Amino acid sequence: MPVSEAVLSAQIELKRSSGEGLVAQLTSQLRALIASGRLGKGRALPSSRQLASDLGVSRNTVTYAFEQLAAEGYLAMSHGRRPVVMVDGGKGIEEIGVAASRLRSGKPRLSPWASKLKQSDWPMSYQAPLKPLRPGHGDFREFPNEIWARCLRRSAMHAARRELGPVNRTRLCEALAHYLATSRGVRATADQILILPSAQAALTLIAASLITPGDEVWVEDPGYPGAAAAFRASGARVTGVKLDEQGMQRVPGMAAPKLVFMTPSHQHPTGRLMSLARRTQFLALSRPGKTWIVEDDYDGEFHYDSRPVPALQGLDAHGRVFYVGTFSKAMTSDIRLGYLVVPLALIGTLEIAQRHIGLIASSHVQEALAEFIADGYFLAHLRRVRRLYHARRDHLVEGLERHLGEVLTAEVPSGGIQLVARLKRGRTDHVAVKRLGEAGVVTRALSSLALGRPRDHGLLLGFAAWRENEIGAAVRTMASCF
């Protein structure tokens, strides 16, 4: 029923004890009366003085509410005249609501980039809980958090005295250039290093800077799904290249692509080491400005059975290789820092692209990490966890052989943080992953990492993040599930 002017104030209840202010309460209640049609179109409201007196509030409270409703189009106000309702609430607002509902129910039109991302099942398909034996993680419990906290505190205290400086902090880039040269054989100056929020950000930056829709990109199959997702989203035609015991194969007769993505130190997911002959073969394939190689050294810090093989980038004499790394495996996953070593011919372009896209890491964390590396804490941490992870790898392999030898064949990697256990007797890995997950053991299906039709079925098992007693318990649980 329409509300008469005489009883309007009786329809409004303002609570001074409410957390919502009086102006907001009055605005909301007047809006509701108009929207319901009880204050019809053309209706003149009481003056601000009269309504304020009836409600027992200040005149400013009413004036501010009227002004807000006028700004929203509910009221018309003019000097010396009472506000007038401008909306037919019983009809107009209902029609607006129906139109809005139709808009909400319609399918949004996405850009080609977003559409291609939605076609990928990465990373949404793998949001598993952090339980044994989830792959892809180091043990955050072994990280020297107190030392890291001191580095962060000092960085914060010095922030006021620090110049704004470059987005890629010089101290960290210099420390990284020295570390990568001595530990991985990477040949680069500090000026060639970009500090990014993650290794995935590095792939996104490369794709945005180099890929033209229709360009051919080769990736390993099975391989890291985030790489295929990043390059597909930029419009590339992604081709999965099969593996052999030496890693990614060079397929005779295939024309050289625009870009090749590989993990030569520890192939993801198999852990295989690419031979020197195969590395040389791919370098001969690439040409500056024509074919580029992206080398992802995601867990290159962890080698157990022999001296680490130098990075592919260190063998490149012609500036054809991007080198991607991350601190999330060696330190802790929530540090959210990765880095990219860029060929000299492209560093200016990628620096501009980095800023344009906004792939900028916190300078506060960068300075703390520079100190953490320069003071020797990073190398000390690596030496300690290498011994731990080596023992955990061996413990997992021994447990799999003893309890599941008739079901699984473990492939023992020379390093890294995870391994592949292949299923025997034609078993399906997706079924096994589901059954194990229900029992509390988190794994990943090898077939889920294939680009095309999967040839092999197996389980990707993490060992670095789990202590030996946790690994033993998980293996026994696995044995009870087969």
Image (spheres, helix red, strand yellow):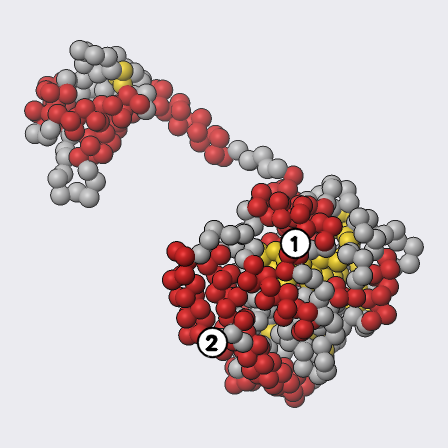
Residue 342, given in percent of the width and then of the height, sits at: 69, 55
Q: Secondary structure at mark 2?
A: loop
Residue 294 vs residue 119: left or right?
A: right
Which image quadrant is residue 424 in? bottom right
The quadrant in which the N terminus is found is top left
Residue 10, given in percent of the width and then of the height, sits at: 11, 27
Q: Residue at x 14, y 17 (%)?
A: 47
Among the two numbered marks 1 and 2 on one chain, the one whose residue lies closer to the N terminus: 2
> Is residue 198 visible in the rendered structure shown here?
no
The quadrant in which the C terminus is found is bottom right
Compare residues 11 and 119 and report the one nearer the observer: 119
Residue that carries the numbered disc 1 in the rendered image: 203
Q: Is residue 338 above or below residue 17?
A: below
Compare residues 194 and 46 and report the one nearer the observer: 194
Foreground mark, 1 or 2, reads 2
- Please state the total of marks drawn on the protein image: 2
The answer to whether marks 1 and 2 mark residues whose Cβ atoms lie closer than 8 Å is no
Residue 23 vs residue 275: left or right?
A: left
Q: Is residue 398 above or below residue 339?
A: below
Q: Is residue 345 above or below residue 405?
A: above
Residue 410, given in percent of the width and then of the height, sits at: 70, 79
Name the mark on residue 144: 2
What amino acid is at disc 1?
Leu
Q: Residue at x 49, y 35 (%)?
A: 105
> Is residue 179 visible in the rendered structure shown here?
yes
Residue 219 vs residue 115: left or right?
A: right
Q: Residue at x 56, y 59 (%)?
A: 170
| Residue located farthest toward the right when viewing the structure as drawn | 253
